[in-house]
Image: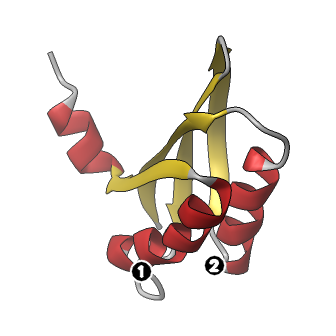
Amino acid sequence: MKKAIITVTGADHPGIIAAVSQALARLDINIVNVSQTLMDQYFTMIMQLEFDDSRRTIAEIQAAMSAVENAQKLVIHVQAEELFTAMNKL
């Protein structure tokens, strides 16, 4: 199993978490951890995902999330957890 990090940002409105989690469920991706917050009217969320990398690639997940991104007017980024960790290491 491979792990990935997904970040979601945009103007807050109903259905963001539902849209993202339903899209991930359709891809058979497990949400391992989630944190979300509101800053004024700005929604931010980070999720740790776990998936079978023999069935799915990061690029495929990002492509699938594009539909959610466009429909919900969000910015969604998907990265391998190793890359996310390396880029954010102090």
Q: Does 84 sit left or right of 1 as displayed? A: left
Which residue is rendered at x = 83% and y = 49% of the image? 15
Which residue is rendered at x = 47% and y = 72% of the image? 61
Which residue is rendered at x = 67% and y = 76% of the image? 28
Provide residue 64's location: percent of width, then percent of height.
52, 76
Provide residue 23's location: percent of width, then percent of height.
69, 70
Provide residue 41's location: percent of width, then percent of height.
67, 20
Is label 1 in a helix, a strand or a loop? helix
Q: Does 62 sit left or right of 74 as displayed? A: left
In the displayed structure, 5 sits above or below 36; it is: below
Quarter of the image for residue 46 reads top right
Q: Which residue is mark 1?
A: 60
The answer for how far apart the CA atoms under marks 1 and 2 are is 9 Å
Q: Which mark is residue 27?
A: 2
Is label 2 in a helix, a strand or a loop? loop
User: The disc labelled 1 sits on which kind of residue?
Assistant: Glu
Q: Residues within 10 Å of mark 1 (few under 14, many from 20)?
A: few
Which residue occupies the foreground of this view, 70 or 46?
70
In the displayed structure, 22 sits above or below 53; it is: above
Quarter of the image for residue 80 reads bottom left
Q: Residues within 10 Å of mark 2 (few under 14, many from 20)?
A: some
- The answer to the question of whether label 1 and label 2 lie on touching residues, with beta carbons closer than 8 A, is yes
Which residue occupies the foreground of this view, 38 or 61?
38
Residue sitting farthest toward the top: 40
In the displayed structure, 36 sits above or below 6; it is: above
Which residue occupies the foreground of this view, 50 or 73?
73
Q: Does 44 sit left or right of 54 as displayed? A: right
Provide residue 70's location: percent of width, then percent of height.
56, 64
In the displayed structure, 23 sits above or below 17; it is: below
Residue sitting farthest toward the bottom: 55
User: The disc labelled 2 sits on which kind of residue?
Assistant: Leu
Which residue occupies the foreground of this view, 46 or 31?
46
